[in-house]
Image (cartoon, rainbow, N blue to C red):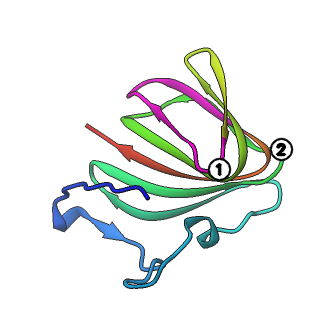
């Protein structure tokens, strides 16, 4: 179980109703793979944060880039190679990885791969 509490200003906060109140949900089941591409599904966002699900089809990935804030990536299904500041790390379902603001990182799916991303922008 993961518990996270983030305090947001109500007027700038949007939550996707795909997750139903009072109903257990596996995040990996909320997003489908799209052939040859990366699918994205925003779950919640505000001016200073974003929580998104991503599904990487086999052979896809994100080239090296820098995040605008601190981020936590959690593997939901499959495996990926996470490049971070010049080193590679294998991430499997159930594992998480943190990026610092402006940390150079990439994601390369090893087969089909699903993940969640919590991005907090300062």
Is the C terminus in the top left, top right, bottom left or bottom right quadrant?
A: top left
Q: Secondary structure at mark 2?
A: loop
Q: Which residue is mark 2?
A: 59
The spot of residue 105 in percent (x, y) is 57, 28
Q: Which residue is mark 1?
A: 93
Residue at the image point whose x is 27% and y is 52% from the top: 47
Q: Nearer the viewer, residue 1 or 82?
A: 1
In magenta segment, residue 96: yes
Count the numbered circles shown: 2
Residue shown at the point (40%, 27%) measured from the top left: 100
Disc 2 residue crowd, few under 14, some 14–19, many 20+, Cα 10 Å: some
Q: Is residue 24 magenta?
A: no
The span picked out in magenta is 92-108
Q: Position of residue 14 (x, y in %)?
A: 32, 68
Q: Residue 113 location, x and y as percent?
A: 72, 51
Q: Quadrant of residue 2?
A: bottom left
First reached walking from the N terminus: tag 2 or tag 1: 2
- In this image, 27 relative to 43: left or right? right
Res. 85 mark: none
Give me the residue at 83% from left, 49% from top: 58
Task: Report helix, strand or loop for mark 1.
Answer: loop
Rate crowding at label 1 as few (under 14), some (14 to 19) or many (20 or more) other CA atoms within 10 Å: some
76 vs 59, left or right, is: left
Query: Which residue appears farthest toward the front when viewing the image?
Result: 1
Image location (x, y in percent) of residue 40: 59, 59
Residue visible at 43% across and 83% down?
Answer: 20
Residue 63 placement: quadrant: top right
């Amino acid at each position: 179980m993961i518990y996270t509490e983030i305090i947001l200003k109500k007027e700038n906060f949007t939550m996707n109703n795909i997750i139903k109140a009072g109903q257990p949900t596996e995040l990996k089941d909320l997003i489908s793979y799209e052939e040859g591409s990366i699918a994205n599904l925003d779950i919640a966002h505000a001016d200073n944060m974003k929580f998104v699900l991503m599904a990487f089809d086999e052979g896809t990935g994100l080239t090296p880039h820098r995040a605008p804030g601190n981020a936590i990536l959690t593997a939901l299904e499959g495996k990926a190679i996470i490049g971070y500041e010049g080193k590679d790390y294998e991430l499997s379902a159930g594992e998480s990885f943190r990026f610092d603001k402006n940390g150079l990182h990439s994601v390369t799916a090893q087969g089909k791969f699903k993940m969640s991303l919590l991005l907090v922008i300062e």
